[in-house]
Amino acid sequence: MKVKNTALNKVLLIGALSLLTILFHYLYGMSGSAVLEAFHRRLCYIPIVLGGLWFGVYGGLATAAGISAAVVPFIYLHRSMGHDFVSGELVELLFYLVIGALTGVLSDAQKRQRKRNDELQEQLRASERLSTIGELFAYLMHEIKNPLGAIQGAADIVADTSVDPRRKLEFAGLLKSEINRLSRTLNSMLSYTRMKLNPGACTITAEINRLLQLLRPQAEKNNVRINLFFQEAPDIQADCDKLRQVFINLILNAIEAMPAGGKLDIAVRRKDSATVEIVFQDTGPGIRPEHINSLGKPLFTTKPAGTGLGLAISKRIVEEHKGKLLIESKPGEGTVCTVRLPCNV
Ligand SMILES: Nc1ncnc2c1ncn2[C@@H]1O[C@H](COP(=O)(O)OP(=O)(O)OP(=O)(O)O)[C@@H](O)[C@H]1O
Ligand SMILES: [Mg+2]
């Protein structure tokens, strides 16, 4: 709908400019004023060039042909001015057509080049994704093999009739926790590889408030104080479930970075007319400079029980929304994670 409207606006603008130039031609074409005549002759090229730029060779030619056709009666009316006048005017019309076609050809070539670049970039992204999936696959094998061994051992003990029931209970608990770990890893992998957005209206502040009801107990356990700075921000078209996943990852990272307590400020604000910004600023230990470039790469973690997929998934979700995830950190001072999302996805 939006695309059609822009095309329609462009056609209307070219039409209006063409009418204006034709009017000028009839009103001032024979005014005798060198300035007015020079002006009106150059004016004709503006809609023709715009037609070629916006609608390619056919757009340029159609605009040039339309203006030429409207100018022909003017030439005919003033044919008594002599052979020089008529041929001069006809040469001008020929140039309208040449300039229209030339601009159109150049603009078409540029569009084709842009399309080719987009395709190349998409291919590059696909091959990057494939190599990441290869890495993830190796990681998955490793992550499944270890708990499977533990599950096998625990299941043997649970099934052994000679083992004391209290010990069996203990191993049944181990079985459950290993299965949970497996399921958590598989879910993270699925989130990373299967990224289909399901957009709808999303009120970011409401989503964060809802999340915090779940996460506050964890923050309190680590003695982390959470402050909210919500400003007027528009609802956005986005996949709320996926964005919630991003916010959970960033809040959990901040809480986990401050096991001995600290402060997490969460701000939601409009950055400019087209962008909403969500900022998570913690007072944790920060990130070591040598780790900054690894952030957001799958499997990078400094935590013994981390999967290293939290930021990678978050980055992908934000990028799928045509947004940006920025991370700034100063060791000893804290970390600032900023999510920027366009208001209209
Ligand atoms: N707010 C933060 N403060 C300090 N370090 C951080 C912060 N956020 C991320 N990091 C660093 O980035 C690493 C990667 O984070 P990411 O969320 O991708 O994985 P993880 O938290 O280690 O594991 P998972 O999210 O799977 O539990 C973390 O291990 C940590 O070293
Ligand atoms: Mg994390």
Image (cartoon, rainbow, N blue to C red):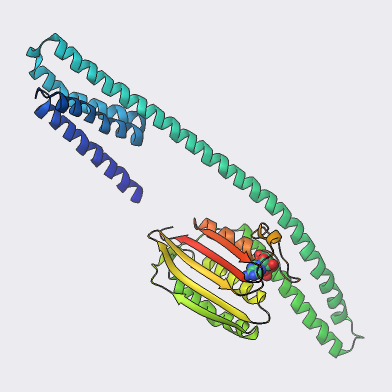
- Compared across the picture, whether 67 is left or right of 101 comes to left
Is residue 285 positioned above or below 58 on the image? below
* Number of callouts: 0
- Compared across the picture, whether 186 is left or right of 168 comes to left
Question: What is the quadrant of residue 327 in the picture?
Answer: bottom right
Which residue is at the front of the view, 203 or 189? Answer: 203
- Compared across the picture, whether 178 is left or right of 90 comes to right
Residue located 62% across and 63% down the image:
311
Q: Position of residue 216 (x, y in %)?
A: 57, 83
- Compared across the picture, whether 85 is left or right of 294 comes to left
Q: Position of residue 8 (x, y in %)?
A: 28, 44
Residue located 52% across and 41% down the image:
118
Q: Position of residue 135 (x, y in %)?
A: 73, 54
Is residue 265 positioned above or below 136 on the image? below
Q: Is residue 106 visible to us here?
A: yes
Is residue 201 positioned above or below 74 on the image? below
Which residue is at the front of the view, 41 or 33? Answer: 33
Question: What is the quadrant of residue 336 in the picture?
Answer: bottom right
Which residue is at the front of the view, 76 or 282? Answer: 282
Q: Residue furthest top?
A: 83
Q: In what quadrant of the picture does the C terminus appear?
A: bottom left
Question: What is the quadrant of residue 73 in the picture?
Answer: top left
Q: Residue furthest right?
A: 162
Q: Position of residue 217 (x, y in %)?
A: 60, 85
Q: Is residue 1 visible to us here?
A: no
Residue located 84% across and 81% down the image:
158
Is residue 71 positioned above or below 143 on the image? above
